[in-house]
Amino acid sequence: MDDDNPIRQDLTGVKQLKRVSSNRQKFEKASKVKNTLKTNKGFGIHGEDEVHQNLSLNETTIEEDEFEKQKDRTYLYVAAIDIGTTFSGYAYSSHKDFMKDPLKVFSHLWSAANYISQKTSTFILYDPEDKFYSFGSDAETRYIELLDQEDAEKWKAFYNFKMKLYEKNVTLENAELLLEDDQGRKKPALTVFADCIRSLKDSLFNNLEEQGINISTDKVRFILTVPAIWNDKSRGFMINAAKEAGIQKEHLLLSLEPEAAAVLCKEHHVDEYYKFGSEDLINFDFCSEFVVADLGGGTIDITTNKILPFGSLKEIKSARGGDYGGTMVDREFFDFLKDCIGSDYDDFIREHLSEFHDLRHDLEIKKRQTGEATHFFVSLTIAPAFEQKIDRSKMKEHNDRIKISHGKLQIPVEFFQSFFSKPIQGILTCLEEAVADEIKSILLVGGFANSKLIYQAVKEKFPSKHVYCPPDADLSVLKGAVIYGHNPDLVASRISRDWLGVIPDENFSPVNLKNSKNDFYLLTQKGHPITMDEKFYHRFIVDKKCDKDTISLNIVSSAADCLPTSTTEDLKRVKSFDLPLPSPKVAALRIIDLIVKLKGTQFDFKARVKSRSPWL
């Protein structure tokens, strides 16, 4: 058909108007869905009327909840920041562009040694005075240059450190988590993460300024992406790091990485529908259920979601995952190299850090290419020091076809692919737990999803499912997080990852005994769906004999398979309150009210003491 046909132009115009109208209605429709999900199926008391129970009480005040106001506020820009294990970046869009086309999201182009990329290396460098020097590929390049100089040991370089928030048990007690650089020297993790976030934030504002856009930080909503399998303490750590980087909490939201990718891919589906009229281009119909696997550098993160009637997302299974990301391939390769070099491997690497980083960089490129070509060998460039150090006999024990020639370590493809075996098996095991019969589609996103080996393995494992790896899979999380930031109501509910509860003592006891079992008072049930912003009210009666000035209320969590008790080994303190308590001489009845609310990706807790005077 002729493109100048006025009828075709009219139809195109109608579709565009429908698209703009649809975007303007998203806020209202998503909110309606969220409100319909607020049913009385949870624990505790679900209404203010029930909380007051017609008691005439004096009470301490609870701070006004500003979260809802900030969440519903319209910002001129939304910017998402992703600190990845291997690569990091940011993306952004204006509110004006979002209302016209949600997919109009911009990301910064980073220049490295020989290429341009939409993400940069997660590599941070500190100078000899221990001051921040630079972040990203420039920092990595500069550090490699410095390694050939005499004062190189005075500089500190950190990379692959995001995994520490998954490996370490981040709690209230060990907030001063320390990271080690590649020479074993330590620095507070909060400082390192904050400097990374600050560097990306500053790059964003420099980018906008170059476009003639001068805007203050309070006009930008920042979205910080985090893995779904992280606990609340690790997420809280990132909020503190953002605050240290100059991003105020009231302008910040966290976004779960696979959830953000789901938002983007759903939006792609809507976009394709309006352009081509197809309802099943990537198999994400409304009310359908699908799995998102965010395959990153350090961890994999898998969620199961359902698209609700107005397009918002509901999490229907707890997130699962593990340390099966792309760096596991690195570990397998360097374990092989360590065996070929011998017991002094660690000392050798410290003496040849420059050559080690070159090899690590080349390995990252070859990882992504494996599975694409039909070459018989994967060729890695190695420095003369490595060539001389490698024990050929040890090398041949692994595979007799491995050879070193003209500065190249040539590894047979089938042996190189064996480095992928453990992460692939881990990914497939996690997917088996998430993929049920009703699941239509599996989304593969994240940098590791670019591996053809991963895609092929998932396709073979789940032949009846639609396996989809979107264009720019490593940017899916960032772009989806921007869309989510413009309309947080796109996520309607999430699954509680852990049991949350209170352990009453001799000083207070719960009003609702149904929630109390084996000396554990249940606040939220593991695996139970929680609607966003839904409040749960819980009440405890203070014992008449308690004459303390303050009373402690400790909220604990557990990842146990069954309902925990006060002696469950993995109990962790989530939140503590020391509440002023009136004397029993002036208060005939003293009650603790606790409010639990899912705010974004974390639970929020507020507590107060109510009292009734004896003469009332």
Image (spheres, helix red, strand yellow):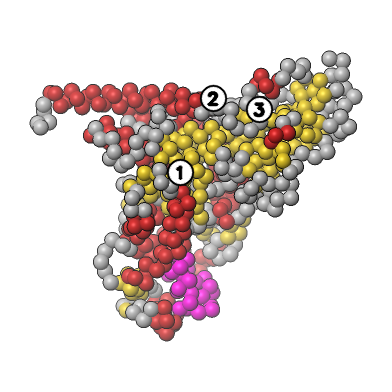
Q: Is residue 180 magenta?
A: no
Occupied quadrant, residue 142? bottom left
Q: Circle 1 sits on which residue? A: 304
Of circles 2 and 1, the one toward us is 1
Give how far across and how far down residue 383 sits, in percent. 39, 74
Q: Secondary structure at mark 2?
A: helix
First in sequence: mark 3 or mark 1?
3
The amino acid type found where label 3 is placed reads Ile
Q: Secondary structure at mark 3?
A: loop
Q: Is residue 360 visible?
A: no
Mark sitting on residue 69: 2
Q: Are marks 2 and 3 in contact (CB under 8 Å)?
A: no
Occupied quadrant, residue 13? top left
Task: Specify few, some or many for label 3: CA neighbours under 10 Å numbering under 14, 14-19, or 20 or more.
Answer: some
Residue nearest the viewer, comparing 266 with 183: 266
Q: Circle 3 sits on which residue? A: 45
Q: Are marks 3 and 1 in contact (CB under 8 Å)?
A: no
Task: Specify few, some or many for label 1: CA neighbours under 10 Å numbering under 14, 14-19, or 20 or more.
Answer: many
Q: Is residue 485 above or below residue 158?
A: above
Q: Secondary structure at mark 1?
A: strand
Residue nearest the viewer, comparing 430 with 160: 430
Query: Could you tell me which quadrant the N terminus lies in?
Result: top left
Q: Is residue 306 above or below residue 114?
A: above
Q: Is residue 444 visible?
A: yes
Residue nearest the viewer, comparing 453 with 577: 453
Q: Main secondary structure of the magenta part?
A: helix
Report the residue at 56% width, 42% height from top. 527
Give how far across and how far down residue 24 sits, in percent. 37, 23
Residues drawn in magenta: 330-359
Give how far across and how far down residue 565 sits, in percent. 71, 46
Report the residue at 30% width, 72% height from top. 377
